[in-house]
Amino acid sequence: MIMNKEKITYKDSGVDIDEGNDLVELIKPEVKKTNRPGVMSGIGGFGGFFDLAKCNYKDPLLVAATDGVGTKLKIAIETANYDYIGQDLVAMCVNDLVVQGAEPLFFLDYYACGKLEKKVAAKIISSIASACKKSNCALIGGESAEMPGMYRAKDFDLAGFSVGAVERNNVLPYKEQISKSDLIVGISSSGIHSNGFSLVRKIMEVRNLSYNDEAEFMPGKTYAEVFLEPTELYVKLCLELHNKNLVKAFSHITGGGFTENIPRVLPEERSFKLAPDFEFSNLFAWLKDQANLSSEEMFKSFNCGYGMIAIISRGELNNVSQLIRDNGFSAKVIGDIS
């Protein structure tokens, strides 16, 4: 006996190809705004082409970086605030490029979800495009993957990949130039940036706090508003400092804080020490208190108010500090090289 078989479509399984195609059309105008010399085609092909010859390098090296936003996404999802999470993704990648002296050239994103919500995805990708434009970095491609069963309905994950270029003789850090008594200059962060959020979320859970509550350390703002401040984009500032030969090294303060990231740019014979009078801002003092952490544990967990550090000669402090201020950041000597 032959049974009539019910048709089962891809959409029935939870994947809506038309919704994905609509998303691509929705974001094309924002993506186009990121075009820069070297871009050869729009999004939608099997791959994005980039012509390095259009960028006027003489002897370039390519530098690649990839990263995500971590569990900061959980707070964005829980509070339905997706305004700046795309900037976090871009910043985590392009900031890693500039610490090596590289100019970001292009970026690709990966957006994976259980159920594609076109408006949410478009807002996130628009944020990615905006951050790329601010960094003079073209968004030349990406992937939006709808995977029912892999993620809960509103959950999603983000990953980014960026490529930059630097002249062979301009690669940072200049380890051979780093000397005892060089200064460590902290460049201000906007807040927590994109690392340490598993600890932040645990604090909120244990202390029975809501992200919509007013932050006790910052009247007038909710915890969510403070925590979701976007990661700073340091591209323009760092390239300007580097091009003017004012720095010996940069370190992007991400996972592992000062403790893990500063040694990555030092020669083996050098170490560093932070100022004994290091002051925590209200936000980080609150985190320190709520988690009952020592200063050393804080330095290994968070950026503690400084998302980027520059290692410089003492004689360049005034010039470096002025340039940092001119770019809208604040600067402070937070330690030195030993």
Image: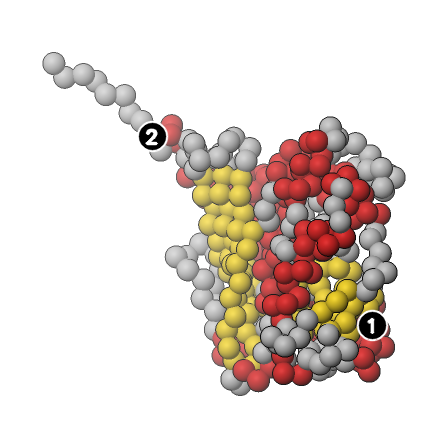
Q: Is residue 322 left or right of residue 43?
A: right
Q: Residue at x 44, y 35 (%)?
A: 150
Counting from the top left corner in percent of width and height, residue 54 is at 52, 77
Q: How many marks?
A: 2
Tell me the residue that label 2 is attached to: 9
Amino acid residing under circle 1: Ser
- Gap in angstroms between the C-alphas marked 1 and 2: 61 Å
Q: Quadrant of the C terminus?
A: bottom right
For marks 1 and 2 on the same chain, the one whose residue lies earlier in the sequence: 2
Is residue 99 positioned above or below 167 on the image? above
In the image, residue 253 above or below residue 54: above
Q: Is residue 57 above or below residue 117?
A: below
Residue found at x 60% / y 49%? 69
Q: Residue furthest right?
A: 219
According to the picture, the residue beneath numbered tag 1 turns out to be 321
Relative to residue 243, is residue 320 drawn left or right?
right
